């Protein structure tokens, strides 16, 4: 058979595979969190009620931590938390190593690769995979971003086997007590517990600090928003015929029929409000909150002039 014919057949085979492979792949999941929760419930609730109780509480804590530390990917993290123990279900336990089996299940169901990676690597799975001789299977799933993985692992380690809130060290101690010293789980935890506890405690502390920063900032914004300065600006705008297009916790946007726009921010510069006006014909003007009366005078002039 000639070389040209072989090349043609190989090219045809590749094109055929490219055309048919996408239809064999699972469709992407639209509602990540809802789908993950339903799958976990289906596989765990009736047959493994304690595992289901644990999973519900892990997912709740993972969401709380993700909303504070990684809000842009909170759905991915929560979805992984719902699925982290799903492969304890007998019909999914193909290797009997639930992180790998759960990751394979998540991938087969169409979840993003990051969800499968988080399931595969959660709570020191690398150490247990080594003890079980399953590193090759685990490494089919690349390691996810460290922060995301630490959040899922922290939520897992802060939750007892039936959903109770526990300290990470207490949780790992319970696991060590549950398995015999020669069991792969016991050996893995014995070798990784210090690092897991340190990582979980760092996540807890970091979340506490960030939550307090947010609470303080929100209180400051609320104080400024409810104060005389913002109320005066809004009253002036209404008096001179401006209309809101946005009014949120830390900014509002107003327009006039002539095309002028004013955007007001507050709470960004200490205790004073910071205002900026965007005037399309004349360009942008900005005033820092160097003094409330000065700022209000400037904004009143802008509003009056741009009627």
Image (cartoon, helix red, strand yellow):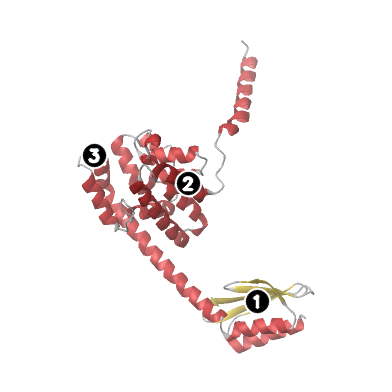
Distance between the Cα atoms at labels 1 and 3?
65 Å
Distance between the Cα atoms at labels 2 and 3?
32 Å
Dot 1 or dot 3, earlier in sequence:
3
Residue at 40% of width from left, 52% of height from top? Answer: 56
Horizontal placement of 112 versus 158: left or right? right
Residue 16: percent from left, percent from top: 62, 25
Disc 2, SS = helix
Q: Taking 133 as reference, is 201 above or below it?
A: below
Residue 299: percent from left, percent from top: 67, 83
Q: Single out the mark in the foreground, 1 or 2.
A: 2
Judge whether residue 171 can be spotted in this image: yes
Judge whether residue 302 can be spotted in this image: no
- Extreme residue toward the top, this view: 1
Residue 87: percent from left, percent from top: 39, 40
Quadrant assignment, res 96: top left
Q: Residues within 10 Å of mark 3 (few under 14, many from 20)?
A: some
- Extreme residue toward the left, this view: 181
Dot 2 or dot 3, earlier in sequence:
2
Mark 2 — residue? 38
Distance between the Cα atoms at labels 1 and 2?
47 Å
């Amino acid at each position: 058979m000639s070389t040209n014919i072989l090349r043609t057949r190989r090219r045809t085979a590749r094109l055929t595979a490219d055309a048919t492979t996408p239809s064999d792949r699972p469709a992407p999941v639209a509602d990540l969190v809802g789908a993950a929760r339903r799958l976990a419930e289906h596989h765990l609730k009736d047959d493994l009620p304690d595992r289901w109780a644990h999973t519900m509480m892990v997912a709740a804590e993972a969401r709380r931590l993700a909303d504070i530390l990684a809000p842009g990917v909170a759905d991915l993290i929560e979805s992984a938390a719902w699925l982290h123990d799903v492969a304890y279900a007998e019909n999914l336990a193909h290797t009997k190593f639930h992180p790998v089996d759960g990751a394979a299940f998540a991938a087969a169901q169409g979840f993003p690769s990051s969800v499968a990676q988080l399931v595969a690597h959660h709570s020191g799975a690398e150490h247990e995979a080594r003890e079980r001789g399953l590193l090759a299977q685990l490494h089919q799933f690349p390691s996810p971003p460290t922060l995301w993985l630490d959040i899922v692992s922290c939520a897992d380690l802060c939750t007892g086997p039936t959903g109770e809130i526990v300290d990470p060290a207490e949780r790992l101690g319970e696991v060590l007590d549950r398995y015999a010293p020669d069991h792969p789980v016991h050996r893995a935890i014995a070798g990784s517990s210090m690092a897991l506890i340190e990582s979980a405690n760092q996540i807890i502390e970091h979340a506490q600090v960030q939550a307090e920063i947010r609470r303080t900032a929100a209180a400051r914004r609320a104080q400024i928003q409810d104060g005389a300065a913002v109320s005066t600006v809004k009253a002036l705008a209404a008096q001179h015929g401006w209309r809101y297009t946005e009014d949120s916790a830390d900014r509002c946007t107003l327009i006039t029929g002539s095309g002028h726009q004013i955007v007001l921010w507050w709470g960004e510069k200490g205790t004073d409000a910071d205002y900026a006006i965007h005037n399309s014909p004349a360009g942008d003007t900005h005033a820092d909150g160097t003094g409330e009366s000065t700022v209000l005078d400037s904004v009143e002039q802008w509003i009056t002039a741009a009627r």
